[in-house]
């Protein structure tokens, strides 16, 4: 283990830039994972990270000790220990977990396709989802519902920011993520039903069949979906709500749609 106590250390400076800057993450092809759960999810899917970064206090955590024992027996990955003060400056959460990992941002082609019972295509298209928590939650629900791909428009938050990674809880390593996508082109090329969610749609989500190849499209909560994306969709649906309710959070709406598809697929598979 290498102990770092100076802000002038080049490795520490790199960590600060990666935590704060989407541009730096893109240029370096690197990002940070926070916490044992995310590190384990990454290692199970893609192998061990480039480096582990601990806080001084984190070295005494039993869960972290177990991870280090496993890591030590399987790889010669570098381990760095930051003073608690420096670790807090890099950690993406107010209460640091005591461990982070430096990883290469995986390309979409390195993520294995999910094992679908029927082998049918299922993906999600996201237009200008700017809140990191919402974006991470949508990706998490999509992965849990069996989606293979997530297409993100230019206006979305950086998918590989530590905050999005933390909200997604490992979905990034189960879902092929395509940033800076032209959603109109994706929708037009998709060989299946493209369903756009919009408050003004006359058809309910529960009135459409979701058992074939499906691409769900979700827009920014404030601006909704652009006309070009709506026109490229096959159907427009809304989620029924009780009177007096204006709208759902984008992540909640996406989860409702994804798991309605799971419900319909389950019925078909059980027949």
Image (spheres, rainbow, N blue to C red):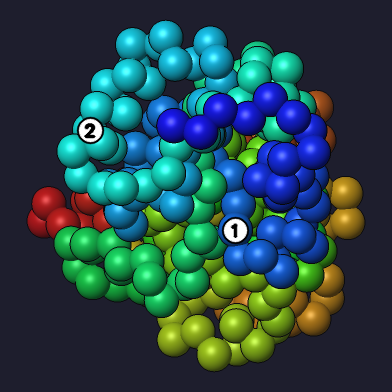
Query: Which residue is depicted at the point 64% across and 55% down?
Result: 159
How far apart marks 1 and 2 lie (CA) works out to 23 Å
Residue 30: mark = 1
| Quarter of the image with the N terminus in it | top left
Which of 169 and 130 lies nearest the eye of the viewer? Answer: 169
Residue 256 visible, this angle:
no
Query: Which residue is depicted at the point 34% across and 37% down?
Result: 40
Residue 228 visible, this angle:
yes
Location of residue 190 in the rendering, given as x and y in whole percent from the top left corner:
50, 84
Location of residue 205 in the rendering, given as x and y in whole percent from the top left corner:
54, 53
Horizontal side of 232 relative to 36 (left or right) equals right
Horizontal side of 266 relative to 57 (left or right) equals left
Neighbourhood count class around disc 2 (C-alpha, 10 Å): few under 14, some 14–19, many 20 upward: few
Location of residue 51 in the rendering, given as x and y in whole percent from the top left corner:
47, 45
SS state under label 2:
helix
* Residue 224 drawn above or below residue 65: below
SS state under label 1:
strand
Quadrant housing residue 209: bottom left
Q: Which residue is mark 2?
A: 70
Location of residue 213 in the rendering, given as x and y in whole percent from the top left corner:
38, 74
């Amino acid at each position: 283990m290498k102990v770092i106590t100076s802000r002038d250390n080049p490795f520490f400076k790199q960590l600060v830039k990666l935590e704060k800057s989407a541009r730096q993450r893109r240029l370096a092809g690197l990002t940070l994972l926070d916490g044992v759960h995310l590190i384990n999810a990454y290692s199970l899917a893609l192998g061990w990270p480039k480096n582990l970064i601990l806080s001084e206090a984190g070295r005494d955590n039993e869960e972290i000790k177990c991870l280090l024992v496993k890591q030590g027996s399987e790889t010669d990955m570098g381990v760095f220990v930051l003073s608690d003060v420096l670790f807090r400056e890099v950690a993406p959460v107010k209460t640091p977990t005591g461990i982070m990992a430096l990883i290469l941002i995986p390309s979409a082609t390195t993520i294995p396709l999910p094992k679908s019972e029927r082998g049918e295509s299922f993906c999600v298209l996201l237009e200008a989802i700017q809140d990191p928590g919402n974006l991470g939650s949508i990706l998490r629900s999509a992965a849990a519902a069996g989606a293979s791909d997530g297409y993100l428009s230019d206006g979305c938050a950086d998918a590989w920011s530590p905050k999005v990674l933390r909200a997604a809880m490992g979905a990034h390593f189960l879902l092929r993520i395509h940033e800076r996508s032209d959603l109109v082109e994706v929708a037009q090329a998709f060989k299946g039903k493209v369903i756009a969610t919009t408050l003004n749609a006359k058809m309910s989500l529960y009135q459409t069949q979701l058992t074939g190849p499906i691409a769900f499209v979700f827009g920014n909560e404030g601006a909704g979906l652009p006309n070009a994306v709506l026109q490229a969709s096959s159907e427009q649906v809304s989620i029924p709500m009780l009177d007096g309710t204006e709208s759902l959070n984008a992540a909640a709406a996406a989860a409702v749609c994804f798991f309605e598809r799971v419900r319909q697929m389950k019925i078909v598979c059980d027949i």
